[in-house]
Amino acid sequence: MRLRPCGQAQDGQTRAGFSAYRRLISRSSFVALSALTLAGCSGLRTPPPKDPDALAEYKQANDPYEPLNRKIYNVTMTFDKWALRPVAKAYVWSVPRPVRNSLGNMITTMNEPSVFFNDVGAGKPRRAGDAFVRWCINMSVGIGGLIDVAKMAGYPHHDNDGGLTLANWGIPSGPYLFLPMGPSSFRDGIGYGIDQGLSPWNYVPRGYGLVSFNWAYNMLAIVQGRSAHLDELDALQRDALDPYATIRSAYQQQRKAQIEALKNDHRATVPLWYHVKNEQQG
Amino acid sequence: MTFFSGRRLVLGSLALLCAGGLSIMPAHAAQNTKQFIEGFGKQLVAIVNSPVSLPEKKEKVMPLIQKNVDIDAIGRYCLGRYWKLATPAQQKEYLELFHQVLVNAITDKLGDYRGVSFTIGSVTKSGEDEAVEATLLRPQQPPATMQWIVNSATGSEKVVDVIGEGASLRLTQRQDYSSYIARNGGSVDALISALKRQIAHHTAAATQN
């Protein structure tokens, strides 16, 4: 699930006078929030257990803020149950699969700049090249990303985000966090903020309906992302005895695997079709 | 030359033979593991794609799973540190329930797929086990790559884990169970009664449909 806060969505006329007020509000709310977090941490942090086996388990779960995380998890899941899941179900019911696939392609393509910058940041120029080519091909020939032409041309999509880039720099994940947009960690949460900064869609100018488009795009991305996991999340909530712990475990393992995959990705500069052609000739 | 004295030559060639044998043996084992997964996968896919009803499919799949999956080992793994803390009676009851839960989880998946095929990729060593890469191809859906972890310590190959999108099923299950037990006063009985409830729900849902 991806959420994109959009600071530009303010009304243009009142912006100048409004921004000073907003800054004050945001600053004081930041102070209040950090005070609240600090005060809350003492009560929302689980102390490490004494028993060595239990301690090993505690360390493996890497979740000292579990009480706080569980609260956020419960709120998020309630919102999901009554709002997001029904909308996602309606979306799947009303929109045929080919259209959904095309919209999915568009969302993937429009996230490609963020993947590109992260690939550059992670020191993976060849991956960055692939992301760049994907962006160029799909935005033009692929009609704004609706058709994944780049994949047919031998440039399949690969994911990357700020959390993975930081991990590639050797920054440890820090404790697990459950944020309103899903499972995360200190590192991945910061990475999420970086991704917002890297996404050009958060810098669209006002006018020409671009801001509305950005909002529509973000909401669509959330619904589309949720609709892709309807069955999995239903099964998880039905089968797991402690869904919170199951999501935590799966997320942490998945991130570890993604980091490994990124580190071991030494792809060749030339695309797949070039190899195939050469092999056929040689 | 004294350097190539008879004994040295014999010892040297013996060492070479051993080294050669060692390098061949894992390759041989990998081949067996690959064949095992290929065979198991083919049988599974044949049942999934067969035009019989869902209950019939479930009945056919059950013995196949019992034969090829080391459910006891997975169950022990999933209970984690509480396995040692559980009494023999609790262990026995837990394993019986775990069998049902696992079989239910697998057979629930059967109805979801039609026209399935799969390809087998490389075999790599993963600790004492071997990991076989398999890609599941479903119509109109992106291919799903997973790894089957195969253990052959008992003499015959058995599946002990499946890794999908980087997450190990048994590890995820273990952390689910241990968290549940820890939140219920560290009692294995709490887990056992939860599993019983889960199975009861499942049968109720199955008979309703």
Image (spheres, grey):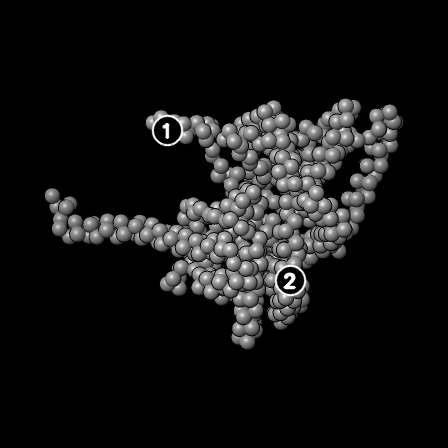
Frontmost residue, A28 versus A158: A158
Question: Would residue A193 be visible to someone looking at this image?
Answer: yes
Q: Residues within 10 Å of mark 2 (few under 14, many from 20)?
A: few
Residue holding disc 1: A280
Chain on which label 2 sits: B
* Residue at 57% from the left image edge and 69% from the top image edge: B97
Up-down relation of residue A179 to residue B191 (above or below)? above
Residue holding disc 2: B209
Frontmost residue, A177 versus B159: B159
In the rendering, at what x and y percent does residue A203 appear?
72, 27
Up-down relation of residue B140 to residue B82 (above or below)? above
* Residue at 66% from the left image edge and 56% from the top image edge: A237
Residue projecting furthest to the left:
B1
Q: Secondary structure at mark 2?
A: loop
Q: Amino acid at mark 2?
A: Asn
* Residue at 68% from the left image edge and 41% from the top image edge: A95
In the rendering, at what x and y percent does residue A17 appear?
88, 27
Q: Distance from label 1 to label 2 (Cα)? A: 55 Å
In the rendering, at what x and y percent does residue A101 appear?
62, 38
Residue projecting furthest to the bottom:
B89
Name the quadrant containing residue B200.
Answer: bottom right
- The quadrant of the picture occupied by the C terminus of chain B is bottom right
Name the quadrant containing residue B79.
Answer: bottom right
Could you tell whether A281 is left or right of B208 in the image?
Answer: left
* Residue at 53% from the left image edge and 53% from the top image edge: B168
Q: Amino acid at mark 1?
A: Gln
Frontmost residue, B66 versus A271: B66
